[in-house]
Amino acid sequence: MSIPFSKFHGFGNDYIVFERGAAKGAATLTELARQMCDRHQGVGSDGLAVLERLDGSVGDYSCEIVNPDGTFASFSGNGTRCAVAHLYRNDMWPGETLRLKTRSGVKNYRLLKRQGDGFLFEAEIGEPKFASREIPVALGSDRAAVVNEPISLDGGQYTFSAVNVGNPVAAIFMDGFDLDWRQIGREMERHAMFPERTNVVFVTVRDRDNIDVRIWERGAGETAASGTCATAAAVLSAFLLKTGREVHVHSPGGTTDVTWRQDDKIVITGTAQFAFSGEWPL
């Protein structure tokens, strides 16, 4: 027995995609993620995206995102985009739009362009949550928004702002990336202020339309890109009046376009590129 899978990446943020029914004879998804995501002894990826067909009443498919350490993510912008691309590439979905059920709600995807094994999608992913209890961030008292909060780490004291855009994300704004942001991200991810852990994004503002980011993802570590981190960075930049509400987010892997509409909905536009397919033996 084996699990047929495809591997895709969104700006270098790579995911292994397969249907849940194919893994019924396997170990838990937690154990599968630890094995398959390993870059030395497995397939290698930043996570699993596990699909299951639904009856259409709530969504068309569900997608479970599992981190390399075996923990579950509420959402992944790049991971779900890779999952949707898998459906289109394998002729499993004929429509121009698709509703994907995730742990953080139903997200709406629209295929904008396909060129060979490359896909461009627009995704409406819901509204940002700024309240400390909704992110969550433990601050001793509830806040309507978490802005410029101090945090003490081994390397010093910093300030962060935070938002939930499907996953909790803490953002540190800075003038450049010459400090040890990886160590800061590693510490912040598991800091007591974040009871569900957190993604950490480091942001440099170029101008009103463009920002640069570096990313430390909860359960995955450093990644070349992240849809949720890009979204959080853009939303917080606009919320803090550093940019407008349409932002090009530049990460080492590529550029994600984020629009925070006036109706409070967030729309992200980005690519998913097929890498290869294979079978994982059980």
Image: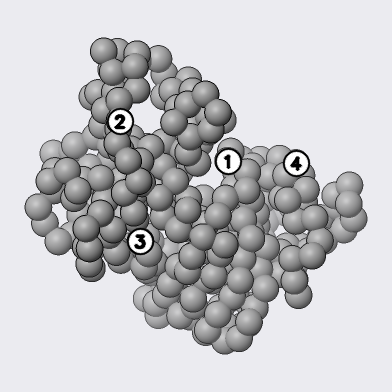
Give, as a three-letter code, the residue at label 2. Answer: Gly
The answer to whether the residues at label 3 and label 4 have Cβ atoms under 8 Å apart is no
- Residue 93 left/right relative to 252: left
| Residue at the outermost left position | 94
Residue 106 in sight from this viewpoint: no
Name the image quarter holding the N terminus: top left
Q: Quick check: can you spot residue 219?
A: yes
Q: How many marks?
A: 4
Percent position (x, y) of residue 128? 48, 63
Element type where label 2 sits in the image: strand
Q: Residue at x 35, y 61 (%)?
A: 271
In the displayed structure, 205 sits above or below 16; it is: below
Question: Which one is in front in this view, the residue at disc 4 or the one at disc 2?
Answer: 2
Residue named by callout 3: 271
Q: Secondary structure at mark 4?
A: loop
49 over 3 or under it: above or below: below
Residue identifier under label 4: 192
Q: In the rendered structure, find residue 220 and report the number of the disc placed on it.
A: 1
